[in-house]
Image (cartoon, grey):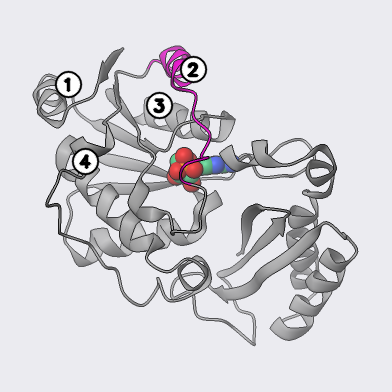
């Protein structure tokens, strides 16, 4: 496994990789959810590149950039075990040198949900992902359903800007109690960690109502809100039932629907979602 820090060196190494090449972009502090993306990439590609880059441009001024958890040595051990070919680990100045001034703005689907709660977040995501695609030139790139809107935004960018790669979505990996794995789970206190599976329970409640024939978005959201209300440590940021393609809110629920939510436990903000097919 090669660990490469500069754009010039990874472009050089890329020329020697067998095709097809799969890319897994991450911000590090890897858990089983990330590793399942790498496994999926490993199954379908001759070479696998994983990037680890805590991208400053996708964090808002009040967000957790400086405290974002990092553990590069542990990440590298895990990636080696997954038979990763190259880890791309650029310093910030390599990705954003002085004078950097170009941005990718995907309009429409970024107005809702995380885009509404975190202005300029997706501009940072789309820009860094576009840069990684240009630098590494993968045949496919792997993203987690855990960040549902991110997948929608990246797919829209790839379509609108005629990029030559396939975007593969990988199912959300969960803890045994249903909590979606996330690097940010480490911030939770023991009590908050015990309370956090309420996110998945409320999503399952929506699925149950849908399977029982309920198509009334407002009543489904009410039931989810009531369930979350029983957990005193949880403060709801938003709950949404939206068209899974356009991300517009739906009053009459029709498949495919994205049921998603953001909930705060103290200072920690967690997101999760399911799709109603
Ligand atoms: P991050 O390091 O949080 O930027 O995540 C890197 C990639 O891993 C993104 O495509 C995420 O959607 C994906 N990911 C993070 N957590 C999970 C999870 N629990 N299950 C599946 N994919 C995940």
- Quadrant of the image containing the C terminus: bottom right
Q: Name the residue under label 1.
A: 17
Q: Mark 4 points at which residue?
A: 95
Q: How far apart are marks 3 and 1 (CA)?
A: 16 Å
Q: Name the residue under label 2.
A: 78
- Identify the residue shown where x is 30% and y is 57%: 126
Left or right, 33 with reference to 13: right
Q: How far apart are marks 3 and 2 (CA)?
A: 17 Å
Find numbered disc 4 in the image and state the secondary structure of the residue it sits on.
helix
Q: Name the residue under label 3.
A: 43
Q: Give the range drawn in magenta.
A: 65-83
Rendered location of residue 201, percent (x, y): 80, 56
Disc 1 packing (10 Å; few <14; some 14–19; many ≥20) = some
Earlier residue among tags 3 and 1: 1
Q: Do the residues labelled 1 and 4 touch (CB within 8 Å)?
A: no
Q: In this view, does 266 lie above or below 132?
A: below
Find numbered disc 1 in the image and state the secondary structure of the residue it sits on.
loop
Rendered location of residue 89, percent (x, y): 30, 27
Earlier residue among tags 3 and 2: 3
| In magenta segment, residue 191 | no
Earlier residue among tags 3 and 4: 3
Q: Do the residues labelled 2 and 1 touch (CB within 8 Å)?
A: no
Q: Are marks 3 and 2 in contact (CB under 8 Å)?
A: no
- Mark whose residue sits in front, 4 or 2: 4
Q: How far apart are marks 1 and 4 (CA)?
A: 22 Å
Left or right, 276 with reference to 230: left
Q: Is residue 82 above or below residue 114?
A: above
Q: Which of 59 and 139 is in front in this view?
A: 59
Rendered location of residue 215, percent (x, y): 71, 82
């Amino acid at each position: 496994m090669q660990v490469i820090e500069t754009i010039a060196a990874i472009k050089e190494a890329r020329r020697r990789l067998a095709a097809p090449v799969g890319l897994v972009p991450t911000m590090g502090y890897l858990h089983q959810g990330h590793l399942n993306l790498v496994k999926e990439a490993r199954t379908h590609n001759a070479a696998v590149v994983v990037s680890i880059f805590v991208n400053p441009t996708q964090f808002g001024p009040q967000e957790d950039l400086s405290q974002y958890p990092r553990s590069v040595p542990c990440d590298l051990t895990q990636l080696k075990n997954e038979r990763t070919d190259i880890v791309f680990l650029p310093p910030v100045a390599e990705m954003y040198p002085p004078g950097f001034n170009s941005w990718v703005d995907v309009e429409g689907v970024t107005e809702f949900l995380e885009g509404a709660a975190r202005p300029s977040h997706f501009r940072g995501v789309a820009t860094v992902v576009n840069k990684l695609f240009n630098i590494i030139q993968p045949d496919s790139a792997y993203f987690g359903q855990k960040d549902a809107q991110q997948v929608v935004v990246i797919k829209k960018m790839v379509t609108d800007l005629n990029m030559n790669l396939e975007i593969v979505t990988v199912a959300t990996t969960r803890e045994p109690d249903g909590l979606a794995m996330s690097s940010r789970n480490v911030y939770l206190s023991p009590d908050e960690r015990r309370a956090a599976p309420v996110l998945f329970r409320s999503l399952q409640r929506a699925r149950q109502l849908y399977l029982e024939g309920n198509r009334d978005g407002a009543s489904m959201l009410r039931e989810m809100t009531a369930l979350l209300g029983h957990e005193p440590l949880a403060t709801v940021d938003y709950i949404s039932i939206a068209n899974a393609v356009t991300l517009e809110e739906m009053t009459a629920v029709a498949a495919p629907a994205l049921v998603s939510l953001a909930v705060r436990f103290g200072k920690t903000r967690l997101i999760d979602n399911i799709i109603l097919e």
